[in-house]
């Protein structure tokens, strides 16, 4: 009877470990492309309301690009100089 209790407890422990995350595939990181011209760089990133504000330094001037982080879709752009 004692052996059955030990075996049952070990089996229960194994099943719990597998269901709590031992067999789930690792999460993938999302990749989004801003589509800025060659020579551009990111000057900074800030969270604004429900968007990401990305300060982009381009050869032709600087701008802030607003991006929806859930979809990766560009929602707006603020040009610092025209």
Image: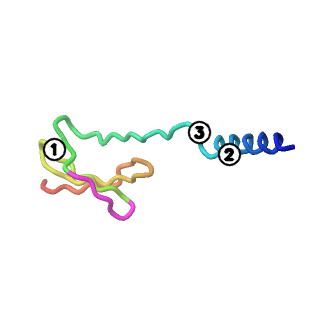
* Magenta segment, prevailing SS (helix, strand or loop): strand
Whether residue 21 is in magenta: the answer is: no
Determine which quarter of the picture holds residue 64.
Answer: bottom left
Dots 2, 1 in contact, CB < 8 A: no
> Left or right: where does residue 55 sit relative to residue 47?
left
Q: Which residues are magenta?
A: 44-50
Instruction: Between label 3 and label 1, give the one nearer the viewer.
Output: 3
Q: Secondary structure at mark 3?
A: loop
Which of the two labelled residues, at mark 3 and mark 1, occupies the earlier sequence position?
3
The location of residue 32, given as percent across then percent down, is: 37, 41
Determine which quarter of the picture holds residue 34.
Answer: top left
Q: Nearer the viewer, residue 5 or 57?
A: 5
Dots 3, 1 in contact, CB < 8 A: no
Label 3, label 2: how far apart the Cα atoms are: 13 Å
Which of the two labelled residues, at mark 3 and mark 2, occupies the earlier sequence position?
2
Above or below, comparing residue 33 to residue 50 in the picture: above
Which of the two labelled residues, at mark 2 and mark 1, occupies the earlier sequence position?
2
> Left or right: where does residue 67 sit relative to residue 17?
left
User: According to the image, label 1 marks what residue?
Assistant: 58
Q: Tag 2: Cα neighbours inside 10 Å, few (<14), some, or many (≥20)?
A: few
Q: Secondary structure at mark 2?
A: helix
User: According to the image, label 2 marks what residue?
Assistant: 16
Label 3, label 1: how far apart the Cα atoms are: 41 Å
Find residue 9 and name its label.
none
Q: Residue at x 19, y 49 (%)?
A: 43
The location of residue 54, given as percent across then percent down, is: 26, 52
Q: Tag 1: Cα neighbours inside 10 Å, few (<14), some, or many (≥20)?
A: some
User: According to the image, label 3 marks what residue?
Assistant: 24
Q: Residue furthest front?
A: 2
């Amino acid at each position: 009877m004692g052996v059955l209790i030990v075996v049952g407890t070990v089996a229960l422990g194994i099943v719990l470990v597998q269901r709590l995350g031992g067999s789930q595939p690792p999460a993938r990181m999302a990749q989004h492309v801003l589509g800025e011209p060659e020579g551009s760089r990111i000057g900074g990133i800030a969270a604004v309301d429900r968007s990401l504000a990305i300060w982009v330094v381009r050869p032709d001037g600087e701008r802030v690009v607003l991006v929806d982080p859930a979809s990766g879709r560009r929602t707006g752009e603020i040009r610092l100089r025209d």
